[in-house]
Amino acid sequence: MKKVNPLYVIVPLLISIAVFAAAMLVLKWSIFICAVMAVGLYLGLSFLSTPVFRLGGVNINQYKNKEEILGLLEEGERDLGSIKGISDKSKDHRIKEKARAVYREGGKIIEFIKKNPHKAALARRFFHYYLDKANEILTKYDNLTSVDIETEHLAALKTKTINALESIVKGMVLQFSRLIASEVIDIEADIKLLENTIKMEDCR
């Protein structure tokens, strides 16, 4: 998760203290005026120095849960990267195919959330369960099969792994459909509000 650099807090504070001291000791202004000026300066500098986090061109500083959004996406992209790595090196055609499907569908959702960060809360299940579980299953399977041996247990595990990945992909597809449907509803509501506003203007 991205954290704010302490310098963004420390530097404005030090500048404000220095100005406060200079106004008090050099200019001989009253403590009240100096305090008000120092506080105003600190707030202004803090605002100007606050980094702007953007996702898909959207400034997410406006969202109260921006840290959660950034954390979800960072975790999701890390899981996707791991899944792609396993997919690329897998020698098993079916496992590779299913891993690529997970990567493809997962990528769609992450790109959607980047462009629509206000929908991140609706995708928690995708990040915390589907994507995380897919990465966990593939990682464990990859570790277990890294030794080139064949047993009945591994054959059975392969089938279960493939079935699990197929279920995860289906869940991701459903999650993505719900996200799109939610966005469509929001757009339709905006259009309806616009139409009603125009009708009210026409009636005047």
Image: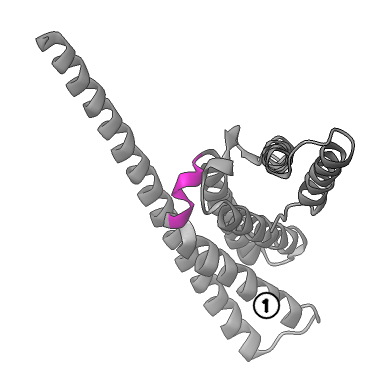
| 62 relative to 24 in the view: left or right | left
User: Which secondary structure dominates the residues rendered in magenta?
Assistant: helix
Q: Which of 188 and 37 is in front in this view?
A: 37
Quadrant of the frame with the C terminus: top left
Q: Position of residue 25 (x, y in %)?
A: 88, 41
Q: What element carries label 1?
A: helix
Residue ID at (89%, 36%): 26
Q: Nearer the viewer, residue 157 or 193?
A: 193
The relative height of residue 198 versus residue 177 in the rendered view (above or below) is above
Does the magenta portion include 30? no
The relative height of residue 153 versus residue 158 in the rendered view (above or below) is below
Residue 202 location, quadrant: top left
| 146 relative to 193 in the view: left or right | right
Q: What residue type is labelled 1?
A: Tyr
Q: Where is residue 161 in the image (x, y as percent from the top left)?
A: 56, 75
| 116 relative to 149 in the view: left or right | left
User: Which residue reaches farthest right?
Assistant: 26
User: Which residue reaches farthest left?
Assistant: 203
Does the magenta portion include 117? yes
Q: Which of 6 and 160 is in front in this view?
A: 6
The segment highlighted magenta reads: 116-121
Quadrant of the frame with the N terminus: bottom right
Q: Position of residue 42 (x, y in %)?
A: 72, 42
Q: Position of residue 106 (x, y in %)?
A: 56, 54
The number of callouts visible is: 1
Q: Which of 42 and 144 is in front in this view?
A: 42
Residue ID at (71%, 54%): 2
Residue ID at (81%, 51%): 10
| 202 relative to 24 in the view: left or right | left
* Render colour scheme: one colour
Q: Name the residue under label 1.
A: 141
